[in-house]
Image (tube, rainbow, N blue to C red):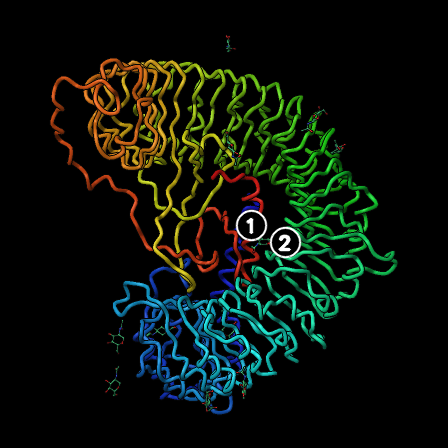
Amino acid sequence: MGSLMWFSQILCLSFMLLQFRVQSSSPSQSSLNSSPHLCRPEERSALLDFKSTTKLGEYCFDTPRPILQTWNESKDCCLWEGIACDKRNGHVIGLDLSGNCLEANLTTNSSLFRLEKLQSLNLSDNYFHYPNISFGFNRWKSLTYLNLSGLTYLNLSGSEYMYGSLPFDEIFLLSKLVSLDLSDNYGLLLDNIKFQMLVHNLTELRFLILDFMDMSLVVPSSLLNLTSSLEHLSFSDCNLQGIPNRVFQLPSLQVLDLSSNPYLGDLQNNRLTEPIDHVEMPNLILQEVYLSNNDMSGSIPSFFFDLVRLASVDLSSNNLTGTITRDMLSKLVNLEDLDLSNNSLLSLSNNGSVVNYSFLPSLQSLTFSSCNIHKFPGFLRKAEKLRELDISNNKISGQIHKWEIEGMSSLHYLNLSYNFLTGIDLFGFGNLSTVDLRSNLLQGSPPILSTTWYSMQQLFISGNNLTGEIPSSYCNLTSLEVLDLANNSLGGKIPECLGNLSNLLFLDLRMNKFHGRIPNSFVIPNYISSLLTLSLNGNQLEGILPRSLVNCRYLELLDVGNNNLNDTFPHWLGVLPSLQVLILRSNRFHGAINDSMPASHFPQLRIVDVAQNNFMGLLPSNYFKILKGMRDVAPVDVEWEYSDNYTACLRDGHCHKIYKESVKVVMKGSERELVRILRTFTTIDFSSNQFHGPIPDKLGELNALLLLNLSHNSLNGQIPSSLGKLAELESLDLSSNKLEGRIPEQLTKLTFLSVLNLSHNELVGHIPEGKQFSTFSNDSYIGNSGLCGFPLTKKCGEPRPPSSQFDEEDDSTTVFEWKFALAGYGCGLVLGLSLGYIAFTIGKPWWCNQVRLISYFRADLATVAS
Ligand SMILES: *[C@@H]1O[C@H](CO)[C@@H](O)[C@H](O)[C@H]1NC(C)=O
Ligand SMILES: *[C@@H]1O[C@H](CO)[C@@H](O)[C@H](O)[C@H]1NC(C)=O
Ligand SMILES: *[C@@H]1O[C@H](CO)[C@@H](O)[C@H](O)[C@H]1NC(C)=O
Ligand SMILES: *[C@@H]1O[C@H](CO)[C@@H](O)[C@H](O)[C@H]1NC(C)=O
Ligand SMILES: *[C@@H]1O[C@H](CO)[C@@H](O)[C@H](O)[C@H]1NC(C)=O
Ligand SMILES: *[C@@H]1O[C@H](CO)[C@@H](O)[C@H](O)[C@H]1NC(C)=O
Ligand SMILES: *[C@@H]1O[C@H](CO)[C@@H](O)[C@H](O)[C@H]1NC(C)=O
Ligand SMILES: *[C@@H]1O[C@H](CO)[C@@H](O)[C@H](O)[C@H]1NC(C)=O
Ligand SMILES: *[C@@H]1O[C@H](CO)[C@@H](O)[C@H](O)[C@H]1NC(C)=O
Ligand SMILES: *[C@@H]1O[C@H](CO)[C@@H](O)[C@H](O)[C@H]1NC(C)=O
Ligand SMILES: *[C@@H]1O[C@H](CO)[C@@H](O)[C@H](O)[C@H]1NC(C)=O
């Protein structure tokens, strides 16, 4: 659990930083004051007036720190949180309310405008009533720092989100501004006239951040008039139509972010690539350049490799071509972070003069995934500071030798997945903590790992051609959290000692040839096993499910399908509080499923698949009743992907992702739209056993169910009309049983039903008509000689029975609603998670990098089923 906590703490920490930076900055400024009544009464009352018209917004991450509660008359207002005063005269000069989830009403008359000496104002990540954020900015003539990023606009009643608006006419007259951040305000349009005003009037600017502003009407050449004092320029996601190459020559520029402007490289006259090459005097102080997602083509302009101060470069997700050679990189002695991934025609070559000097001495992270590399860049062997190397999804083949890698003594994260490697000598590396070798052509035994590798946390070698057994030395990797050896040809027994790895979260040994029993070693003295996922599907394991699994208190997924296990139904797993997925499919499980389970059992179970076993007796109707995880499922919006392909795919080939609950949603500006809250994937598959008796009515209560398969049993009686209440059902298979009577009309209420199979039963009478039923073919009904009506050719003799009691309880069954959700750019949407997993993929602001850290192993373990 330790590391999981750690990951979620990073997440929390990021948010806390975001929200509470306020406290770390301002009090230190004001606490220097000695005078107890420094604060000016008129300014204090202005602040209190503001407080009285401001409340906490509705959607906040956790409980925001109640900053305004410290705004209290009994204390000097210079000591309030978020306030900074001028020590000489007590004027409020700084106001930082960023990220406090405040819902404010900033009108023309707002008392805030009475703080006439304000120099620094940060209102980012709050809510404002629209259109009342305005008019009065020009009174803040001394303002040098203004941050209005990530605002969320509400209509006057506070009930709906609106497109944003900002008083550009006033802001662009604040000629003393040094720093202006208007980013992440969705729906703002900055036209050319306003932009001209900005560039002409704000001549002191050093920081200008306009990310997500719609600048499609800005004439590219007007960027030439940007002030030469600019140090940090960020126009990411601005829909820019071009950019003059001389922007690179702004003499003070250190950070340039023009990422995600897809038309930048497209315009004939403003192709970023070609003219840029003619930059005569490269800016020698430029340190960070972000040009990802720009649809740039051609080769990387050569002047780039002369920018000797460059520390961080991101050219990922373009259409760059050519080959980067060792010599080209050799001048970039300050380069720390280079991302060239997703340029499918870009390659890297070892060619160049012999490296006898310290090569790329500062490089810490190199990401070159999904490009066109054919050979391992051996010249990196001297990159002593390199911590992260990702050259996954290239065309690297053959063997990687020890000498090619042994100098990378700091390497920590190595991703070579999706290549054509036949071997690698991992002994060459030092303190790796993540190694990803998935989907290569590795042969022979699993790599032997040095026993000194206590730091190894994640080891992915699935999808290779490994043979032999799991080396028992793996049991010495005491920090191991993820062991993924799925889809190989490994055999032998699963080492008993793997159960001793007390930090293991994910153990995936699917699709191998393991035999023998599942180790009964999940009992660790003084430890509770931290295992979350245990996947042993598709082996030749025998015997029973080890009872010690009950010690895995955090287990969420247990997949032992497609083995030779011989056991009864594991009721005893019902006490596991988090178990969500239980797959026993295709084994020799047998006996009846005891129907008298305590109501507290299996509280989270969402996917249960016991198909193709020898279970018998009645279907456990109480058991269905207690499955809370399949009822009243809270709307969810965080993806939680499983690799269990077959459970996640419907027969028609329509596959689903599996989603996990989240707790709260906070909005942080950026794009928002109405989206359907995603549903948890819930399935029951009891097919191909020997169950008999009726289908329990109570199944109808599992109203979050998406897939129900009871086929190939000996069920009899009628199809319960309660199944019509399974409002989310997409697939219903009751075929090859002995069901009799009519098909209930209520089934026509299943508006999402796309697969229906009732074939080979003893059903009679009219097939219901209308809605989804008009889409099913003969195949859904064959083998029922008593059925008639569409789509069968057999006409019904008698008239269709009236559809009675059809409209009852219609409203009480709707669980899922359409709700507002923010489809932000990953980070616009901030989610609080119960367990701290997260599967964001796109990162925007700085703290997103941390989120990515969390997501990679989560997402990588799970092949996306979709
Ligand atoms: C002001 O703060 C003090 C202590 O911080 C508290 O006792 C008092 O009730 C507060 N007054 C108001 C009006 O909130
Ligand atoms: C916002 O201010 C306007 C004008 O002063 C006022 O009419 C409105 O009621 C205020 N709204 C809220 C929520 O305070
Ligand atoms: C602003 O204040 C003036 C006078 O103080 C008042 O006449 C006007 O209605 C106020 N405007 C708003 C929008 O509250
Ligand atoms: C808000 O502004 C202050 C400076 O006044 C700055 O230190 C802080 O980082 C800013 N917060 C955010 C979230 O931008
Ligand atoms: C601001 O810019 C506008 C448009 O470029 C210009 O007309 C105006 O004179 C400028 N104002 C100041 C105070 O510089
Ligand atoms: C830049 O500003 C100058 C005057 O300050 C003006 O003549 C020129 O047209 C501007 N350039 C562009 C591209 O707007
Ligand atoms: C990249 O270039 C190829 C061919 O040059 C083109 O077919 C493809 O559409 C380009 N991709 C993008 C994203 O522009
Ligand atoms: C895996 O290895 C076996 C024997 O080593 C070989 O016969 C087989 O072709 C290999 N499979 C692949 C996909 O390389
Ligand atoms: C595991 O570590 C122990 C002691 O740290 C050592 O005695 C043992 O040989 C190691 N086992 C393997 C297989 O490396
Ligand atoms: C399952 O195990 C029992 C003994 O526990 C044995 O009698 C039975 O034959 C086994 N069934 C199969 C199918 O192996
Ligand atoms: C899932 O299985 C289907 C067929 O069984 C296969 O076509 C598909 O590629 C698989 N998807 C994944 C993500 O493994």
Locate residue 73, reporting x and y percent: 35, 80
Seen in the image, is 106 located left or right of residue 462? left
User: Could you say which quadrant of the image residue 804 lies in?
Assistant: top left
Q: Position of residue 636 (x, y in %)?
A: 38, 46
Q: Amino acid at mark 2?
A: Asn
Which corner quadrant holds the N terminus?
A: top right
Of badges 2 and 1, the one in the foreground is 2
Picture quarter containing residue 687?
top left
Residue 443 shows in this picture: yes
Q: The residue under label 1 is which amino acid type? A: Ile
Query: What percent of the width, then of the height, locates residue 853?
Result: 58, 52
What is the secondary structure assignment of the residue under circle 2?
A: loop
Q: CA distance from mark 2 to mark 1?
A: 25 Å
Q: Quadrant of residue 268?
A: bottom right
Q: Secondary structure at mark 1?
A: helix
Name the residue that disc number 2 marks.
343
Disc assigned to residue 864: none
Is any atom of residue 83 visible in this view? no
Residue assigned mark 1: 854
Question: Marks 2 and 1: CB-CB under 8 Å?
Answer: no
- Choose the circle earlier in sequence order: 2 or 1: 2
Judge: label 1 CB < 8 Å from ligand 4. no
> Total of numbered circles in the picture?
2
Q: Position of residue 548 (x, y in %)?
A: 53, 26
Q: Is residue 131 above or below residue 525?
A: below
* Image region (quadrant) for ligand 2: bottom left
* Left or right, 432 with reference to 726: right
Mark 2 neighbour density, 10 Å: few (under 14) some (14–19) many (20 or more): many
